[in-house]
Image (cartoon, rainbow, N blue to C red):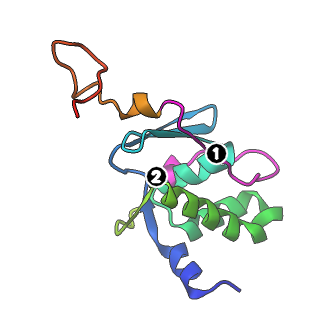
Amino acid sequence: MFDSGFEMMQEQSYTTSVPDVVSEIFDGEAVIANYHSGLYYSVSRSGSLIWQALGSGLTPSQIVRWLSAHFKDQAGELDAVVADFIDRLSAEGLILETADTTADATLLPVLEGARFEPPALERFDDLQELLLLDPVHDVDTTGWPRRPAE
């Protein structure tokens, strides 16, 4: 059985509204950009479901119940899968713990497919230099984007 730390995490609320982090869903997959670190991420369809559920205010245990209702054959493994993915999002600074317990399950996507694949979070740094530029606030007579003076 899981330890009390895992059980406490299951009831913790998280937010995807993190300063300098933006996301967009494309064909069921998420792209997340962290303008603070200059990193961006590609999130698989299953990871995107968890991302959207966190953005809707669901706790990890609520996410597991939501996914288990559709992916019944995999219900027993979803606790660990969801917890691991949330740990990865948190370690990357893409989500934050929050005291807000307001959840809006009406915003959740419709679950499709017969299997829930383990969520994938791919991290990319090839655009890091460009993402660290702040084209909105760094505009002057020289144009943009430009590197801030050091």
- Circle 2 residue: 94
Q: CA distance from mark 2 to mark 1?
A: 23 Å
- Vertically, is 146 above or below 52? above
- Vertically, is 118 above or below 78? above
What residue is rendered at 55% in x and 74% in y?
A: 10
Q: Percent position (x, y) of residue 126?
A: 54, 31
Residue 103 visible here = no
The quadrant holding residue 137 is top left
- Mark 2 belongs to which amino acid? Leu
What residue is rendered at 50% in x and 54% in y?
A: 92
The magenta stretch spans residue 18 = no
- Which residues lie in the magenta part? 105-127
- Vertically, is 121 above or below 26? below
Q: Residue furthest front?
A: 150
What residue is rendered at 67% in x and 43% in y?
A: 45
> Is disc 1 surrounded by few (<14), some (14 to 19) or many (20+) residues within 10 Å?
few
Q: Quadrant of the N terminus?
A: bottom right
Q: Percent position (x, y) of residue 91?
A: 50, 60
- Circle 1 residue: 110
Tell me whether circle 2 and circle 1 mark residues in contact (CB < 8 Å): no
> Is disc 2 surrounded by few (<14), some (14 to 19) or many (20+) residues within 10 Å?
many
Q: Main secondary structure of the magenta part?
A: loop
Q: Percent position (x, y) of residue 43?
A: 61, 43
The magenta stretch spans residue 116 = yes
Q: Secondary structure at mark 1?
A: loop
